[in-house]
Amino acid sequence: MYMIESKGGAIICMLLALFFLGTWPAIMTLTERRGRLPQHTYLDYTITNLLAAVIIAFTLGQIGPSRPNFITQLSQDNWQSVMFAMAGGIVLSLGNLATQYAWAFVGLSVTEVITASITVVIGTTLNYFLDDRINRAEVLFPGVACFLVAVCLGSAVHKSNAADNKSKLQDFKSLETASSSQIETNQANSRLAKGKAKEGTAEFLVELEKQRAIKVFGKSTIIGLAITFFAGLCFSLFSPAFNLATNDQWHTLKHGVPKLNVYTAFFYFSVSAFVIALILNIRFLYWPILGLPRSSFKAYLNDWNGRGWSLLAGFLCGFGNGLQFMGGQAAGYAAADAVQV
């Protein structure tokens, strides 16, 4: 297997991860705003997300002089570390699934600020101690404190945005219980026919609500924040779990059993993320949440609107996570958590 051992190599991995992990949320948001059901999008996303892990495992996990390689470790008695890796994959998948809905309620920028900040505050602190404090605390923790402030500011921004949008939409009757059919009959729609609405105006918000898959008018702002904080808590746990899987700080492996390499751990991590995503999203097809329309597996297979973007998002996230873990193994997972922001 190929191992990243230098700090320079770790920095390159984390910079690439920063680009990949910063791009895929925007793509997923785009598909939802164009009307594609989030269940359909996430099913496509999770397929290529797993495929990215398989590609990394059978290439970087097999080449190079370092041993044991990926295939060798599949048959070793390392189930304790495998469980940590799979637990990390489950919480990451739950977090990504939650953010897909949070983007609609809270907005992409605010969601990413809050979830990333929670990840840094909790996840980086846990990884700092798991990494045996290899990173400089006087540099790390002032940054963590700043992100704690960012969580509070992000929540305040969401509340302010919600109040601003409500003010813009004051012409609509009973906004708190407005449905799509009520919106379509509102007088503001007559202005939409004259041309594309200006971004940020009430007309734009109405037009977006009509087109998007997740309807947010009339929903409590608390719902969006609750989903966002849940996602942030999930994100804060996946990296420490992966850290435990590859470094065995709790000494759960039997004597003489090699620790999981980053590629084997990432493979199990991604398999568990795939399985939980598959189960939940197939369930959401037939029993949707948050007022989404009912779908079916056949409808999903026939839905090619935005499929290419969804598959691309899965690849970007998969390779981004893999690069993050490769960099974390060399430079410390506490430092690697920075790519979440």
Image: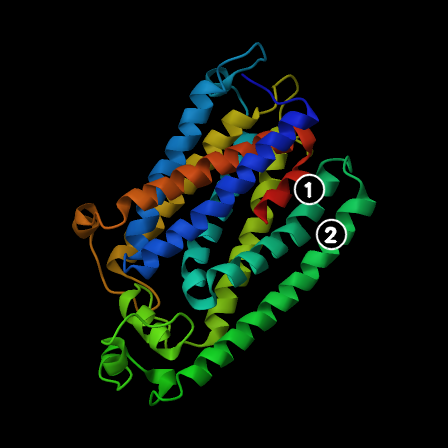
Residue at the spot of label 2 = 143
Q: Which residue occupies the extreme front position in the image?
A: 194
Spot occupied by residue 246 in the image (x, y as percentages of width and height): 60, 29
Marks 1/2: CA–CA distance:
14 Å
Question: Which of the two labelled residues, at mark 1 and mark 2, occupies the earlier sequence position?
Answer: 1
Q: Is residue 33 depicted above or below 120 in this figure?
A: below
Spot occupied by residue 48 in the image (x, y as percentages of width and height): 36, 37
At horizontal 80% and vertical 40% (from top left) the residue drawn is 136
At horizontal 22% and vertical 50% (from top left) the residue drawn is 300
At horizontal 34% and vertical 83% (from top left) the residue drawn is 177
Left or right: residue 333 versus residue 179 is: right
Q: Is residue 101 depicted above or below 245 in this figure?
A: below
Residue at the spot of label 1 = 127
Decide: few, some or many residues near mark 1? Use Cα within 10 Å; few <14, some 14-19, many ≥20.
many
Please identify the quadrant where the N terminus is shown. top right
| Image quadrant assignment for residue 324 | top right
